[in-house]
């Protein structure tokens, strides 16, 4: 499993330079700066304690640029509740010290060393086992699984107390450790894929060296597979992956079984089978499952290919706080990112291994097909839109491309649309609640629909007394349309009708203006503006902080009794 992207949390401007250097080590990590104290962070937070605790509870690794004591005190109330925890590190503001605090099993020492290398200092590693033996026995590298953590802890403390150990089986990473090895030792580390009860003086480590060829036809796949492994005397922990033929790529039970067993699912051509894997012995089985066992952990990335994924995501209006967590997670797992250059840049920064495919805004269908071609190869592809991907954006184009295609590989792609905060909603929230009652969303662009239909819809929506949200209100190629649209609306609304203009909402230099329909002219609006026009019940009143609140009441007609 790839650890999730860390958050870099800073309290003052003085830490930003160090934070940026750490970000070079983890390019997907965001710098969270305290509001009012830090300028130029990737996102801001209001309260240090609440922010740190929320990150910890979401299992986000934390790199806090402040005193270790502050971090400890802040997280203290949560520490006892938690079994598995994310890595937590304190880093000195000037980058002179890197202190791993929590998350030994979450790889905190590995992170401490990576950050320390980036800052050209040494990490303050305090874990005795790791210091003494040069490796954390309890956190074996990927490809190996520890049988039992509690037994493992006791085992390591025995070694620290002076007991020697001998190693049974092959584990190249242990050969590099400085263990107190003695062929006569009572204690042993046993590495092997066989199912086995640990003896009192034994640490069991399983290499993930078994591939299981399965099919969607197998009933109760997880349990059937467990039985097949048991009959073959192989430990479930040795399972490295499930393999199926690529025509079954979309089968839900395969996906669920892989999830339940905690292993990746790979696909091979129907003409191929596990015999194609190098250095394995094949064990057939009566349950419609074939097992392939290797001496060494299997390199799962080399076995067939994964089911490709295509996520059409919405970034929200711009500010990182307004991006939904599912989108953030998707950005971290993507191999390829497609979209209009401005939005791809807004979605970044990306790691070196993530490929950015920037295209012109007009080539929507081409971009959608390109995304499917990449995903059908097994890649994890993102198509970015601003706001919500289903609102005048890429989601519909992607579905249209799929609808037009007869390629089964495209239809097997794991396609998901992840929503975002649309510009009308982000603008409305800043103004108050102008869309608090029924409203109508329209794009004023006549690039993809005739102007006559826009006029007709405007006329009917205005007549129906719906509040109106205009996307794409104007552009250089469409200079007169907004003026005409306002004329139509004015036939049904009074000049006093409140209007909200939000420009670059959630982005640097955002502006929010409240005006009226009578005072609104097309030159106050550009293509980066959201236009919200009230209904007959929309009203305004002054805010204590200056400016106005705008809202449309929940009721219509007669105000209900309080
Ligand atoms: N999918 C996007 C809309 C794309 S259409 C969404 O859901 O928000 C592009 C139009 O959206 C722009 O012409 C502008 O009218 C509006 N828009 C997009 N982002 C905006 C922002 N941050 N502030 C104000 N308007 C925005």
Image (cartoon, grey):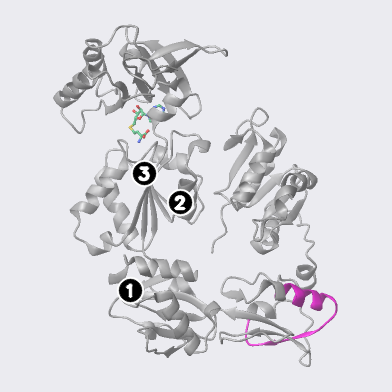
Residue 339 tag number: 3
Give the labeled residue for mark 1: 216
Whether residues under marks 3 and 1 lie with C-beta atoms below 8 angstroms apart, the answer is no
> Going from the N terminus, do you reach mark 2 or mark 1 first?
1
Residue 330 tag number: 2
Secondary structure beneath dot 2 equals helix
Crowding at mark 2 (Cα within 10 Å: few <14, some 14-19, many 20+): some
Image coordinates of residue 141 in percent, x first then y, are 61, 71
Residue 504 visible (yes or no): no
> Going from the N terminus, do you reach mark 2 or mark 3 first?
2
Real-space Cα distance between discs 3 and 1? 35 Å
Real-space Cα distance between discs 2 and 1? 27 Å
Label 3 within 8 A of ligand 1 by Cβ? no
Q: Nearer the viewer, residue 355 or 369?
A: 369
Assess whether residue 218 is covered by the magenta stretch.
no
Label 1 within 8 A of ligand 1 by Cβ? no
The N terminus lies in which quarter of the figure? bottom right
Residue 272 tag number: none
User: Is 71 positioned to the left or the right of 356 in the image?
Assistant: right
The residue mark sitting in front, 2 or 3, is: 2
Image coordinates of residue 514 in percent, x first then y, are 42, 14
Assess whether residue 163 is covered by the magenta stretch.
yes
| Magenta highlight range | 152-171
Q: Residue at x 43, y 25 (%)?
A: 427
Q: Nearer the viewer, residue 524 or 192?
A: 192
């Amino acid at each position: 499993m790839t650890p999730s992207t860390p958050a870099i949390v800073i309290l003052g401007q003085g830490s930003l330079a160090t934070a940026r250097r750490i970000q070079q080590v983890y390019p997907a990590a965001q710098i969270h700066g305290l509001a009012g104290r830090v300028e130029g962070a990737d996102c801001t937070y209001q309260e240090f304690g609440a922010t740190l605790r929320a990150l910890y509870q979401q299992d986000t690794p934390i790199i806090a640029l402040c005193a270790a004591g502050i971090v400890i005190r802040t997280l203290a109330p949560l520490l006892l509740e938690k079994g598995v925890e994310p890595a937590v590190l304190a880093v000195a503001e000037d980058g002179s010290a890197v202190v791993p605090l929590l998350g030994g099993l979450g790889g905190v020492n590995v992170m401490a060393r990576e950050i320390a290398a980036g800052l050209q200092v040494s990490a303050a590693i305090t874990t005795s086992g790791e210091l003494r033996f040069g490796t954390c026995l309890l956190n074996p590298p990927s490809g190996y699984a520890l049988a039992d953590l509690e037994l493992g802890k006791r085992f390591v403390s025995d070694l620290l107390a002076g007991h020697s150990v001998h190693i049974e089986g092959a584990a190249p990473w242990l050969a590099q450790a400085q263990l107190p090895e003695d062929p006569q030792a009572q204690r042993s580390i046993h590495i092997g894929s066989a199912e086995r009860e640990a003896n009192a003086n034994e640490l069991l480590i399983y290499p993930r060296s078994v591939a299981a060829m399965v099919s969607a036809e197998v009933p109760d796949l997880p349990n059937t597979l467990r039985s097949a492994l048991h009959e073959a005397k192989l430990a479930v922990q040795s399972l490295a992956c499930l393999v199926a033929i690529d025509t079954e790529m979309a089968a839900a039970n395969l996906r669920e079984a892989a999830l339940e067993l905690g292993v990746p699912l790979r696909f091979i051509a129907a003409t191929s089978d596990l015999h194609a894997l190098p250095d394995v012995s094949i064990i057939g089985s009566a349950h419609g499952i074939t097992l392939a066992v290797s001496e060494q952990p299997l390199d799962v990335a080399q076995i067939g290919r994964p089911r490709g994924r295509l996520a059409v995501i919405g970034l929200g209006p711009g500010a990182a706080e307004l991006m939904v967590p599912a989108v953030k997670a998707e950005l971290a797992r993507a191999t390829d990112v497609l979209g209009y250059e401005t939005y791809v840049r807004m979605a970044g920064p990306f790691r070196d291994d993530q490929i950015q495919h920037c295209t012109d805004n007009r080539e929507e269908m081409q971009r959608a097909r390109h995304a499917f071609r990449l995903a059908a190869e097994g890649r994890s592809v993102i198509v970015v839109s601003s706001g919500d991907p289903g609102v005048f954006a890429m989601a519909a184009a992607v579905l249209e491309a799929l609808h037009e295609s007869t390629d089964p590989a495209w239809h097997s792609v794991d396609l998901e649309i992840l929503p975002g905060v649309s510009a009308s909603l982000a603008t409305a929230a800043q103004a108050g609640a102008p869309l608090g009652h029924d409203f109508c969303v329209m794009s004023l662009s006549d690039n993809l629909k005739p102007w006559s239909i826009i006029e007709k819809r405007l006329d009917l929506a205005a007549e129906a007394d719906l509040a109106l949200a205009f996307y794409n209100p104007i552009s250089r190629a469409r200079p007169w349309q907004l003026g005409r649209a306002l004329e139509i609306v004015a036939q049904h609304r009074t000049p006093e009708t409140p209007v909200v203009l939000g420009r670059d909402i959630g982005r640097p230099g955002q502006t929010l203006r409240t005006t009226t329909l009578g005072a609104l002219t097309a030159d106050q609006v550009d293509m980066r503006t959201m236009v919200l026009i009230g209904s007959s019940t929309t009203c305004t009143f002054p805010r204590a902080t200056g400016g106005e609140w705008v809202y449309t009441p929940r009721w219509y007609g007669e105000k209900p009794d309080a």
